[in-house]
Amino acid sequence: MDNKDINIEDRIDSLLAMMTLDEKIGQMTQVRHFEEIPEDAISSGAIGSIIHTEGPLPGSDAASWQATFTSLQKKALSSRLGIPLLFGVDAVHGQNTYNGATIFPHNIGLGATRNTQLVEKAAEITAVESKATGFNWVFSPCVAIPYNEKWGRVYEAFSESTALTEEMSRASVKGHQGRRLDQNSIMATAKHFIGDGATDNGVEGGDCSLSPQEVKERLLPPYQAAVDEGVGAVMASFNSMARLPMHANKYWITDVLKESMGFNGIVVSDWKGYSRFGENEIINAGIDMVMAVDGDFEMYREGLKAGVENGQVSLARIDNAVRRILRQKLRLGLFENPFPDAGLIAKIGIQKHRNVARQAVRESMVLLKNQDKILPLDKNLGKIVVVGEHADNAGLQSGGWSIHWQGSTENYTGSTTILEGIKRLAKGEVIYDIDATGDHEDADVAIIVIGETPYAELFGDIGGEIDAYQLTLSEEHQRYISTYVEKGIKVVVLLISGRPLVTTDQIDRSDAFVAAWLPGSEGHGIAEVLFGAYHFKGKLPHSWPKSVEDYQGKYGPNFWDSSYAPLFPFGYGLEY
Ligand code: GLC
């Protein structure tokens, strides 16, 4: 512990000695901004953190977002001890709640790049644009190891590979926080601890039945990497582990994460994480701060205070939780510099940032088929037909957690679409046949962009035991492909999806097939690779399924189960 850390611990000791129980519980309380809370809640020290998520925006532009959070911060500073607030946001692929921010490919695409420097740079830019909109905490990166494409959050994670996820997690935490958590950082959060992507049948919040040994070998290393990198927070997961909900799992949160792994930051609950257990159980399990949202503010505070007064929760546990929260606020320099830097506003969405995101788009693309080397396309082709609603819609190319929690189906500020990118590079005629009903028998090639519509969290779940037929393409999108194949036109398919899908037939029928994941705002990076300005570099971060039968067990095809012969293995990807 260096002098700075010793000074911080001394400052915590003196604050703790002055704090009332109400003020201590206040630090352990996170509410949603614009939540219905008592007028004096912040100025009386009853709140330690504010979360911005789906719902009213803090304002019309970054300056008004900063002003909103500054006024809330001033209320906190006016409290008896003047402890500043943490402001948290789900900036999971850029500051994606802000219309106009640079939106990166989701983590599954970043995993396909295998480029740790690029991932670190993306996190640095996300940190700048998140701070520019008033935040000092992001609930990212998700370091899950997805076992089953039936899970609705595969795209939030980097890969099925533990080793690749470890590397990416380390780079992401370093990009967000810098070499150490300090006044230049935005605090990162490794989530969701633990087993979120390894539940039986990929059910969000389901039960993970892996053995403790398998959890330690396969799911824990990315958390150790994040802890070693100094990650400021870890978020508990909705799933249960061997039937015990993670939020109340003292063994994994306290004994393993805090004591064995040495994590000295904040364990934050997920949304209303106490709902499956009471607030006292989850605090005793080791959770330090709770998302007491949607009207639960008073219930949570009163329940926890009663728990302390009746001895169910020890004062030592409360003090340890508050110590961890104050430690991060002091490391972030919030006591000396509690307000956002207005000078950062001009950096939101600048071309330099977008160029990095466009590089990530290019390097995330995985070439699964290239028959007769139809790719790269000749820019001078006489007539290119572009098909599919995903070709000209920034919302569809960005997936969930983009502008809105469940994503958008509209273009948004600063974005470019895949079609715009093709038109920018092609010298010949480019026709947009959105639903493959056009009469373009004379086209030289059809670029058919199909895939998933945006979803987030459980809305992306295929659903437990049921057949994985939803992991195939829609009838409409299958028709787009067959229409042009049956015209005898060369077909290049771009799949926009948050996960591998069962596309064996479509791959067989196409001349070229590219997994483009969820590229984000810089859609024109796609065309730069299709026309050969850049090479394909992406490699599969997941095993690719052959058929829906691959999902008859608890998990999908992944390299943990050698009995599977996926259509394409983890790490597969063709090059020019
Ligand atoms: C959600 C998600 C979590 C997110 C949190 C705050 O339920 O599970 O990833 O960070 O709530 O929005």
Image (spheres, grey):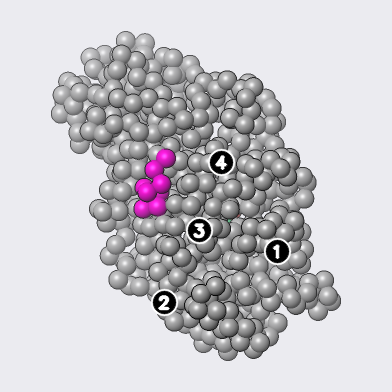
| Count of labels in the image | 4
Which residue was labeled with disc 3? 229
Q: Amino acid at mark 3?
A: Glu
Residue 512: percent from left, percent from top:
36, 20
x 81%, y 79%: residue: 309
Label 2 – label 1 distance at C-alpha: 30 Å
Q: Is residue 66 magenta?
A: no
Q: Is residue 103 left or right of residue 559?
A: left
Q: Is residue 316 above or below residue 485?
A: below
Q: Amino acid at mark 1?
A: Gly
Label 3 – label 2 distance at C-alpha: 26 Å
Disc 1 residue crowd, few under 14, some 14–19, many 20+, Cα 10 Å: many
Residue 529: percent from left, percent from top:
28, 32
Label 1 – label 3 distance at C-alpha: 21 Å
Label 4 – label 2 distance at C-alpha: 38 Å
Q: Nearer the viewer, residue 358 or 34?
A: 358
Which residue was labeled with disc 4? 162
Residue 233: percent from left, percent from top:
56, 62
Disc 3 residue crowd, few under 14, some 14–19, many 20+, Cα 10 Å: many
- Tag nearer the camera, 1 or 3: 3
Residue range corresponding to the magenta coloring:
114-122
Q: Amino acid at mark 2?
A: Phe
Q: Of marks 4 and 3, which one's residue comes earlier in the chain?
A: 4
Q: Of marks 2 and 1, which one's residue comes earlier in the chain?
A: 1
Q: Is residue 316 left or right of residue 117?
A: right
Q: Amino acid at mark 4?
A: Thr
Q: Of marks 1 and 3, which one's residue comes earlier in the chain?
A: 3
Name the quarter showing ligand 1. bottom right
